[in-house]
Image (cartoon, coloured by chain):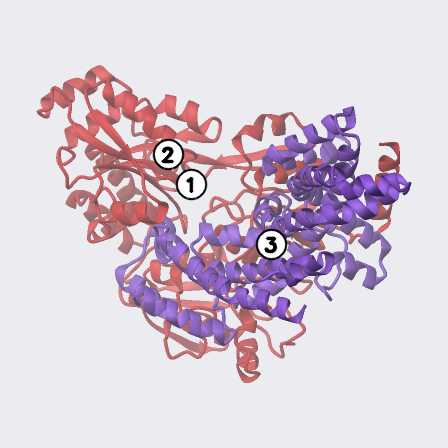
Amino acid sequence: MRELRTLALAIAALFTAAPVSAKTLIYCSEGSPENFYPAVNTTGTSFDANTQIYSRIVDFERGGTTVVPSLAEKWDISSDGTVYTFHLRKGVKWQSNRLFKPTRDFSADDMIFSIERQWKENNPYYRVTSSDHAYFGDMGMPALLKSVEKLDDLTVRITLNRPEAPFLSDLAMEYAGIQSKEYADAMLKAGTPEKIDQEPIGTGPFFLVQYQKDAIIRYRAFPDYFGGKAKIDDLIFAITPDAAVRWAKLQKGECHVMPYPTPADLDAMRRDPNVQILEQPGLNIGYLAYNTLKKPFTDARVRRALNMAINKKAIIDAVYLSTGIAAKNPIPPTMWSYNDDIKDDPYDPAAAKKLLAEAGYPNGFETDLWAMPVQRPYNPNARRIAELMQADLAQIGVKAEIKSFEWGEYRKRIEAGEHQMAQIGWTGDNGDPDNFLHTLLGCDAAKGNGSNVAKWCYKPFDDLVLKAKTVSSQAERTALYRQAQVIFKEQAPWFTIAHAVQLVPVRKEVIDFKLSPFSRHTFYGVDIKQ
Amino acid sequence: MIRFALTRIAMVIPTFIGITLAAFCLIRLVPADPIETMAGERGIDPVRHERLLHEYGLDQSIPVQYTRYIERVLHGDLGRSFITHEAVVSEFAALFPATIELALCAILFAVIIGLPAGIIAAVRRNSIFDHGAMSVALAGYSMPIFWWGLLLIYLFSIKLDLTPVSGRIAVQYFVEPVTGFLLIDTLLSGDKAAFLSALSHIALPAVVLGTVPLAVIARMTRSAMLEVLGEDYIRTARAKGLPAFRVICVHALRNALIPVITVIGLQVGVLFTGAILTETLFSWPGVGKWLYEAINRRDYPVLQGGTLLIGAVVMAVNLLIDLTYGLINPRIRHAR
């Protein structure tokens, strides 16, 4: 053993003798990115890898959901809310790589290229890497955009077919990362268009140095970044899929920041003097949706009765442990327009039984209760939650049979409305309440296989969220959304379970790492003590 | 010998067809549509769903899909990943050296420890060593890889601080891949510290992955040796006064090796299975972890292509083993 230790010390000595850059931050990421083209990415892992490289026209403030200038310094919105004129920043430099050295700064051409690449099928890049521009489609851009025009090198006018208040937030999302048209043209000419998505250049704070799938992503601070050079010199993503191993690496100082800890490790993390856990409620919600098209859930009294029969606190304590907070509204408390005046349904089985009798079910009824087969960011163990709910419901005479399907099949079936009660959830895209209230509860989403799995189409509610889409004043929108939440609570299409708390353990030498409400992990502005 | 080799090679062809069929069909038996799996909570509108099914060729009947797949395979095209949109062959080529490097180190570890342990246990039958070694082998064989790996990380990396937790090399070393085998690439780069770093990183995963083969090899060597040591010709050799070392290592071991080599060959398949967990645990960028993710995400091209390529490697190794028998034991070569 002594010999082994001597060898290890010798190895350690060699490691420390090796040249290390001035300031290197190592992030133990959970997986490999899909590729380096955020417009076709669908996972947070890919967005984390790409957000270091690319900038967007507008951005979310660091650690928040407010839209702030980025590549566009300012913008004007027409009084009818359909024309956006973006005034772009001058002198923004592009990164370079072994394939391409830019000859010009960022301009309107790049912005238009990046939009048209996702929008127009005749764009030569439309099908490069993939034609499935998932988020562009999901945010309704093809139907929303009327025209995108270059007014001059640094001015772009976007005209919409209808007013859409969350439009700026949509442009701050990762899928809207801006790529270089000059690089794209050069690669097209060279016959290797896919290279722009494999060896990317952007205008972001870090440029890509090396990527080895499932092993490592190396970035270096881009000295000409328009916001000023990053405080760290090198950023390394050490790809570490297992949460227990990420924690072991953090303990040993082999990485400085890790995402998605296992709840079982949290106590040990809190005891470690070299580690602090940053936490905030995430932009998410886990809920149980009642199928309001199927009896007995067509009656709001039945839904409210069930809401009172389920012991939410017991679920949070037993399943979420310290990683969730009870949800009373369909939007998370960190989101603007959250209505904190609303009182949650009390846990009161006697009152629930009485209300159920009033609705015509004094002896309860039989129903199904669907539980996801997988862990999700907003729900650590749907099966366990279903068991707890089942026991609570049995007390008021409701016999719930737990059902589950393979994950893809599960979603397909609940979107088709095959369930009576089903657990599901949501993680916000753009920080706008519309992304929860209209996307998950609007009448449009209740049709066909939409994401309104409660199939709840209630005109007074829908009118409010539709109106809020067309109003640009945030104060006015807030009032509309607050009222919508009151109606939601009265009508109870869901039993709101919890908002999962985002937890990021970081080593204490890391300075000013800010949690993102979107669960992004960005490192511009972060410093490290040496 | 040539006839023997050709017969064995001919037997590979139906196996290869079987693998393509199994890889193709099994993944399609798993419920879930890859497009739905990609969509997540967001769901997917039916138009986009249909378009993607068409683009990926999944709207065709299964026999048509299979025929097209085989056509492409015969042209050397294993398709592109649904997730990364990269060619399956190029992803495999980038990741496979890491798996091979790990598997070779694991099997080397298993043979170096397992073979002598089995021989000694057989020679000193019923001794403390025999009972001890076989109990340890049984424990090693029964050990769940994930748990065993975490245990070793906890002891050697965290408590004793002897080895790194995971990865292939410390992040400060920037070694451009030449062969893809990091132990070789670091030597080629002339950076001794980088080589030692790579070596220290491979130690734990190799031990974890090599544990089950080690147990199997040790037990198989022991039983084969016991059988051979009881043979008449061994008694004759001893009676003629040959030194014990020569009797055991030349006369007995050579004959006992045939089942042991068979087992080593079979362990190659076990290594690839074990690599899925070991690579995930130790963040080892190999094909095991790649396939594991492909299963979760229903990435059909990766699963089909990866299974086919790994199947080809396992078959090649077993073919090599078959041919090796012929060299070790001429009777096998001449058998029909």
Would you say B193 lies left or right of A423 here? right
Colour representing chain A: red
Q: Residue A214 got which mark?
A: 3
- In the rendered structure, which amino acid carries the disc numbered 1? Arg
Residue name at image x 23 percent, y 41 percent: A454
Percent x, y for residue A140?
32, 61
Percent x, y for residue B53?
33, 65
Residue at the left extreme, as displayed: A360
In whole angstroms, how far apart are the C-alphas of marks 3 and 1? 22 Å
Colour representing chain B: purple
Q: Secondary structure at mark 2?
A: helix
Residues under numbered marks 1 and 2 in contact, where contact means CB atoms less than 8 Å apart: yes
- In the rendered structure, which amino acid carries the disc numbered 3? Asp
Badge 1 is on which residue?
A: A376
- Marks 3 and 2 on same chain: yes
Up-down: is A287 above or below A202? above
- Asked whether residue B202 is in view, the answer is no
In whole angstroms, how far apart are the C-alphas of marks 1 and 2? 9 Å
Residue name at image x 40 percent, y 26 percent: A316
State the image quarter where residue B245 is shown.
Answer: top right
Would you say A209 lies left or right of B46 here? right
- In the rendered structure, which amino acid carries the disc numbered 2? Ala
Badge 2 is on which residue?
A: A382
N-terminal label among 3 and 1: 3
